[in-house]
Image (cartoon, grey):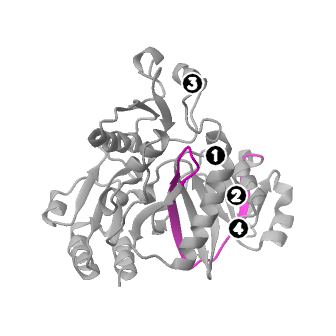
Amino acid sequence: MKPVCVLGNGQLGRMLRQAGEPLGIAVYPVGLDAEPEAVPYQHAVITAEIERWPETPLTQVLANHRSFVNRDIFPLLADRLTQKQLLDKLNLATSPWQSLNAATEWPVIFSRLGSLAIVKRRVGGYDGRGQWRVKPGDEQHLPDEIYGECIVEQGIYFSGEVSLVGARNHQGECVFYPLTHNLHEEGILRASVALPKPDTHLQQQAEKMLSAILNELKYVGVMAMECFVVGDNLLINELAPRVHNSGHWTQNGASVSQFELHLRAILDLPMPRPDVATPSVMVNLIGSRVNPQWLSLPLVHLHWYDKEVREGRKVGHLNLNHPDRMVLRQTLSQLKPMMDEVYWSGIDWALNKLS
C-alpha cells in the first residue's frame, strides 16, 4: 500500500499514524518546517491534519503534488466566509449571517440579526479564540482590526450541540457514524457522548446535509459537521475537513475508528459502515497532567498526546464504552472524584445523556 504523508505533526497526525500501523500503512506526520528532501512524499498520498498552513519550502512542494487529496478544498473551508457561501449555495440551514466590514454596520446588523451577535474571525479562530459575543453597546469594545476579517452570525438559542463524522471515497460512497452529542465550555469541547441508536430524524437529516457537502466538493476522506439542535431541526455551525476531536470516541467505540476510516478512504480501500454497538463517552483532557489513578478503572482508555501541559491546551482524552449504560454511568461516577473540579460539569452532563 502507498505510504501517507500528513501535513502537520500534532495529535491528529499522531493518531493517524497509530491507525495505520495495524494495516501495514506507513503514515508520516510531518512538521510544516520540515525540509522537503527529508520527507518521503514522492510516491505517497498526501493528507492534512490542519485546514491552513503558512508558505514554507515543504508546503510549496506539496501544493503541486498530484496526490494531495482535497488540496483545493482546504482553503475554501478554512475561511468561514467561503464556507458559509457554500452552505448557502446548497440551501443548507445555518444561523443567519453576514460579513462584518465596518463598525458603521452595527445598527443594521442588530436590526437584522437581533440583540445577540457572534463575531468570528474568517480564518484562524478555534476553540473559542477569535470569537466575540456581542450585544448592543459591546461593539465599541471590539478591536478595530477585525473589520473586513470577520463574519457575524445571529446568536442561536439551541437545545443541544451535535456533530456528524462521515467519510466519502473516490467512488462517491459515503458512510457515517451515529451523531455525537457534544458539550462545549468557553468554546472548547469538554465531553462527547455517542449512542448506537441515535435519534432517527436528526441522523437522517444530518446524513443528507453532509452527503450534499461531500458530493458537491468531491471530497475524499473524513469530514466533521458541527450542528446546533433547534427544535426538531439542525443548523450547521461549522465544517472541519479532517478527522475531528468529537470523533475521538470511535477509537474504542466503533469497529473502525475515524482515523482508520480516513486512511481507507484516501487509499481507496474497502470502506464499510463502522459498527457501533455500545454507548461511548469521550472526556477531553485540557491543561491537566496524567493521573495514573484513572487507569484503575477498567473501562477507561487513556490517549495521551505527549505534549507540554499548558493551560487551555488539549493534551489527551479519555474514552469509555460499555454495552450497559448503567455500568458506564457507574464508571463515570467513580472517575469524577479522580478529576479536577473543572471536569465535573462535563461528567455530570455525560451522566445525564446516558440516563
In the visual, does 347 lie left or right of 204?
left
Q: Can you say which quadrant of the picture contains the N terminus?
A: top left
Q: Relative to the observer, which residue lies in front, 185 or 167?
A: 167
The amino acid pointed to by label 4 is Ala
**What is the CA distance from the residue labelled 1 to the residue labelled 4?**
20 Å
Along the polypeptide, which appears first: circle 3 or circle 1?
A: 3
In the visual, does 142 lie left or right of 101?
left
Along the polypeptide, which appears first: circle 4 or circle 3?
A: 3
The amino acid pointed to by label 3 is His
Q: Nearer the viewer, mark 1 or mark 4?
A: 1
Q: Nearer the viewer, mark 4 or mark 3?
A: 3
Visible residue check, residue 204: yes
Q: Which residue lies under the disc numbered 3?
A: 65
Q: Are marks 3 and 1 in contact (CB under 8 Å)?
A: no
Which residue corresponds to the image point at 34% horizontal and 39% vertical from the top-left?
17
Q: Which residue lies under the disc numbered 1?
A: 218
Q: Relative to the observer, which residue lies in front, 11 or 314?
A: 11
Q: Which residue lies under the disc numbered 4?
A: 93
